[in-house]
Structures are given as structure tokens and as C-alpha cells.
Image (cartoon, rainbow, N blue to C red):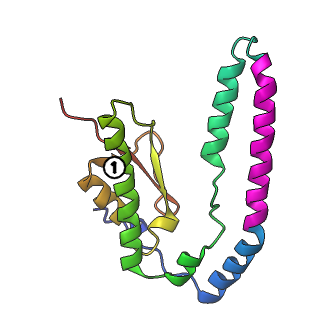
Amino acid sequence: MHHDDSWGPPPPRPAFALWLRFGLSMLFLPLWWLLLAVIALAVIAFSIVGEILTVIPGFEKGFLKTMDWFMDRVPVWPAWCVTWPELRHEGDADYYRARAQGKVAGLTRKQLAAREAGKAPPPGPYDIPVRDYRAAGAGHVVDVARSQGWELSHDRPSDPARIVRLRRLPEAP
């Protein structure tokens, strides 16, 4: 367990600010998703044309690298939005502990399913955003993750106020 206060739960947000952000989220989130859909359609159209351009050495690799970069940095649920469950459960530590445990358990199931299928799991690190552990604290996520064979990522450090980045511990021979 981390004893640094930054790994504990942040203070609850004021109710008025939460309601305001929830209202703005309901207005702007559909526009955000529409923008993402337009970008996805543009990428599909470009990839159709890109099939012709694959005769250019390195084009496909660069295109895929750019797409990975974009998908890593553009969230479907942006940090500025407040969802209905977040609004209802602000400050509810039990709810957020269960939510964080569910996220880590889901990552563990995916890893085990990939191993049982004989496939390599998707490369990490795996990110758990603050919206999944707010009232429980990032330290709780780390404790749950360690009990299921995870550790904090060393490649890209975690920011307990925003995100916890995990990687799977290497398998013992």
C-alpha cells in the first residue's frame, strides 16, 4: 500500500460543480462522439485509398503507428465529462472499490483467456482512469492489482490523480 497521500482518495467534488459538469457533459458528449465517428469514417476512407499506397515502403507501418497513437490519446469518455453513475456515487467508497476491483478482474480475465487460447495478450500498460477508483483511491487499485498478479508500469508512470497504469507480472518459469 502506498502511504503517500496522493494515492488516497481525493476529496469529494462539490455537488453544484458536479451537476454543472453533468449538464455540460450531456450537451457536449454527443458532439464529442459525433466528432469521433466522423474521424473514424475519414480514417476508413483514407485506409481504402491507403491500400493503393501500400506499395510505398513504410506507409502501412507509419499509418498503423499513427492510428495507435491516436487511439491511445483520444478517449471515448473524456476526463471532463461526468456520467450519471459518477454523479450518483460521488464519495461512495464502497461503490468505487467494487468498480476498481471489477476493472482489475476484467483485465485479469482477458489476460488469462489470451493465455488459454495460446495467444499473446495485448501489449500493456493497461490504464485505469480515476473515474473508476475516485472515492477508493489509487492505492486501493494497486493493492487489488498486486493481489491478482499486476504491478505498476515502469515504462509510463502512473499519476494517481488521473490514471493508474498496470502491467502484468512476468510468469514464473
Q: Residue at x 68, y 21 (%)?
A: 60
Q: Main secondary structure of the magenta part?
A: helix
Kind of residue indicated by mark 1: Thr
Q: Position of residue 97 (x, y in %)?
A: 36, 71
The answer to which quarter of the image holds residue 50 is top right
Q: Nearer the viewer, residue 113 or 19?
A: 113
Q: Quadrant of the N terminus?
A: bottom left
The answer to which quarter of the image holds residue 135 is bottom left
The residue range painted magenta reads 29-52
Q: Is residue 71 above or below residue 141?
A: above
Residue 91 visible at all = yes
Would residue 100 appear left or right of 26 to someone viewing this image? left
Q: Quadrant of the C terminus?
A: top left
Q: Position of residue 31 (x, y in %)?
A: 79, 63
Q: Nearer the viewer, residue 143 or 83?
A: 83
User: Mark 1 falls on what kind of element?
Assistant: helix
Q: Is residue 79 above or below residue 86?
A: above
Q: Is residue 35 magenta?
A: yes
Q: Residue at x 66, y 50 (%)?
A: 74
Would residue 91 appear left or right of 65 to someone viewing this image? left
Would residue 82 appear left or right of 152 to someone viewing this image? right
Q: Position of residue 101 (x, y in %)?
A: 35, 63
Which residue in the structure is indicated by mark 1? 108
Q: Position of residue 40 (x, y in %)?
A: 74, 44
Q: Residue furthest bottom?
A: 16
Residue 8 visible at all = no
Q: Is residue 156 above or below residue 56?
A: below
Q: Nearer the viewer, residue 123 or 55?
A: 55
